[in-house]
Amino acid sequence: MSQLFSPLQLGGLTLSNRIAVSPMCQYSAQDGLFSTWHLQHLSSLAMSGAALVMIEATNVSADGRICEGCTGLWSDEHGRSLADVLTGARKAAGNISFGIQIGHAGRKGPTQIPWQGGKPLTPDQAWTAVAPSPIPLAEGWPTPKEMTLADIAQFKRDCVDATRRALAAGVQVIELHAAHGYLIHQFMSPLTNYRSDQYGGSRENRMRLPLEVIAELRAIVPRTHALGARITATDWMPDGIQEADCAVFARELEALGTDYVCVTSGGLILTAPIKIAPGYQVAFAAAVKKVVTKMAVRCVGLIAEPLQAEQVIGSGQADQIAMARAFLDDPRWGWHAAEKLGVKIDLPPQYARAHHSLWPGAKLVRP
Ligand SMILES: Cc1cc2nc3c(=O)[nH]c(=O)nc-3n(C[C@H](O)[C@H](O)[C@H](O)COP(=O)(O)O)c2cc1C
């Protein structure tokens, strides 16, 4: 009996397995609008065998983008572009849940699109970045503007508006991006937050913004859906966020009724010495699982082998696995994992007719 292919209750959703496609920026939006690229990308992933597809980090305001190609939800037109894409992608495959990550890049934008160089842009080339404190990401990056209390209040309203639009577009899972060095993570880490008001200083103050946002989102995300957050286990820096901070944050999120956390790390300091290896963040998820009771815990990071994923779930280290690169490399990863683990899953009838077991006289050997 595969544990990876067993059902998972995520908030009000019952997912048919524990595989999620991790959110992945496509840098293919025009003025923040979802495009035909997103339609084909998400339609393809809807037939990946994963029960949940998380849509890329989508920004709550235009100045919250990493670059021009990032998606946004700062107007109703943006919401409609997402609704169109989801309607199309759902036609491709029935039994799929879509979630979205909402976020703000803070001092990690604006940049060129990665494949156009990814270099930082100055305010006259794009927009002025905002952050909890005026500390540039690295040498050669512009200094962000320190957010005022009014800016923070606006950011919270933007998160609520973006979430309402995502829900209206048919998204079933809302995930607050509190990791990878983006705005909320910048508030949470002592390395990037030098504020002296109620949003800086103590850990309690640094956690205030994400907890306030989650409380507001909990009030509008229906219990039939799921609300989660992507959180940081460690900054991989001596004076940054540590696993003990992550445990406290996870418990606070749980107390507010958050349905799940996805545990990741790094991204705040470009030179941080991250120890990357297969499954390198599983232990972080397992540590969070030990301190929460109701909330589901998702893990991510160089999990690409079906047996490895099965072992993580089977050993109880996490409730759900997210994978990013493996799904771009093989958009049918879930089908192939099921086969490897001896699990029978339903394929769309249009494709089931072409299954390799039906090829006369030919044998498919997967690498
Ligand atoms: C092309 C690409 C885009 C990504 N965009 C996002 C994103 O929008 N939000 C996010 O939290 N992580 C993003 N990530 C990180 C992944 O979600 C994931 O956490 C990371 O790649 C580790 O998982 P993997 O080893 O399975 O790829 C991105 C990764 C890739 C490769």
Image: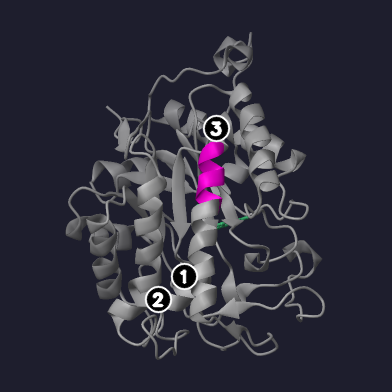
In the picture of the structure, the residue carrying the numbered disc 1 is: 184
> To which residue does mark 3 refer?
48
The structure residue drawn at horizontal position 44% and vertical position 90%, both measured from the top left corner, is 194
User: Looking at the image, is 128 positioned above or below residue 195?
Assistant: above
The residue identified by callout 2 is 188
The tag earlier along the polypeptide, 1 or 3, is 3
User: Label 2: few (<14), some or many (≥20) within 10 Å?
Assistant: many
Residue at 35% x, 50% y: name it: 218
Q: Does the rendering let one see residue 137? A: no
Residue 128, located in which quarter of the rendered image?
Answer: bottom right
Instruction: Please tell me whether mark 3 sits on a helix, a strand or a loop.
Output: loop
Q: Is residue 287 above or below residue 227?
A: below
Part of the protein shown in magenta: 162-168
Q: Are marks 2 and 1 in contact (CB under 8 Å)?
A: yes
Element carrying mark 2 = helix
- At label 3, the amino acid type is Ser
- Mark 2 is on which residue type? Met
Please indicate whether residue 167 sits to the left or right of residue 189 in the image: right
Q: Please name whichever residue, 250 or 348, is drawn nearer the observer in this view of the structure.
A: 250
Q: Gap between marks 1 and 3, in whole Å?
A: 31 Å
Assign a secondary structure to mark 1: helix
Residue 130 in view, yes or no: yes
Instruction: Answer above or below: position of 60 versus 190.
Output: above
- Quarter of the figure with residue 147: bottom right
| Horizontal relation, residue 53 to residue 82: left or right | left
* Residue at (30, 85) in percent of width and height: 202
